[in-house]
Image (cartoon, rainbow, N blue to C red):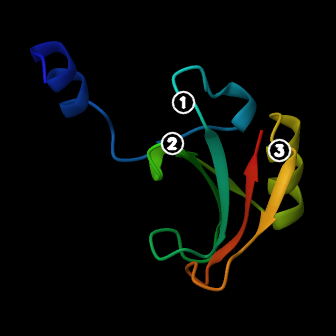
Amino acid sequence: MNKQKKLAKQNTPLYKRVPTLNLVDYSDIKVPLVVIYDSPKDFPGKVVARVWDGEKNRPTNVYCEYENLKRCEDDVMSAGFVFKFPRAPEDDACIVETYMR
């Protein structure tokens, strides 16, 4: 890893909260996904949408919090994520659904 990438990785915040998914730059993610969670361990009692890098099969540090599931779904769809997949039986129980562009 070159020095510039290593420095950027060290300065990346653990969580990067955004007010809406419409403000996220997805250009560096080949397969952007949004996974919706209902009360995950790190945000108990919250509805959270996390941006995932589908190609690497891992979450990014970008997320958005919502008052309820309806507002979350509306924001996800307004950001261009229109293909919805329900939670698979082997997924974490707090996952509600996954969206893809």
Which of the 4 image quadrants contains residue 61? top left
Answer with mark 1 or mark 2, whichever residue precedes in sequence.
Answer: 1
Task: From the top left corner, tell me how far across and down residue 54 is, in percent.
Answer: 55, 46
> Do residues under tags 1 and 2 come within 8 Å of each other at their CB atoms?
yes
Q: What residue type is labelled 3?
A: Asp
Number of residues whose C-alpha sits closer than 10 Å to that of mark 2, classed few (under 14), some (14–19) or many (20 or more): few
Instruction: Report helix, strand or loop for mark 3.
Output: helix
Q: Name the residue under label 2.
A: 55
Q: What residue is at 51 percent from the left and 22 percent from the top?
A: 28
Q: Which residue is drawn at 10% across and 16% down?
A: 3
Secondary structure of residue under mark 1: loop
Specify the amino acid type for callout 1. Answer: Ile
State whether residue 23 is above or below residue 43: above
Residue at numbered disc 3: 75
Image quadrant containing the N terminus: top left
Mark 1–mark 2 Cα distance, whole angstroms, equals: 8 Å
- Identity of the residue drawn at 16% across and 22% down: 7
- Reading the image, the residue beneath label 1 is 29
Left or right side of 70 for 76: left
In the picture shown, does residue 5 fall above or below 82? above
Mark toward the viewer: 1 or 2: 2
Vertical order, 3 against 93 (above or below):
above
Could you tell me which residue is drawn at 80 percent across and 42 percent down? 81
Location of the C terminus by quadrant is: top right
| Labels 2 and 3: the sequence-earlier one | 2
Q: SS at mark 2?
A: loop
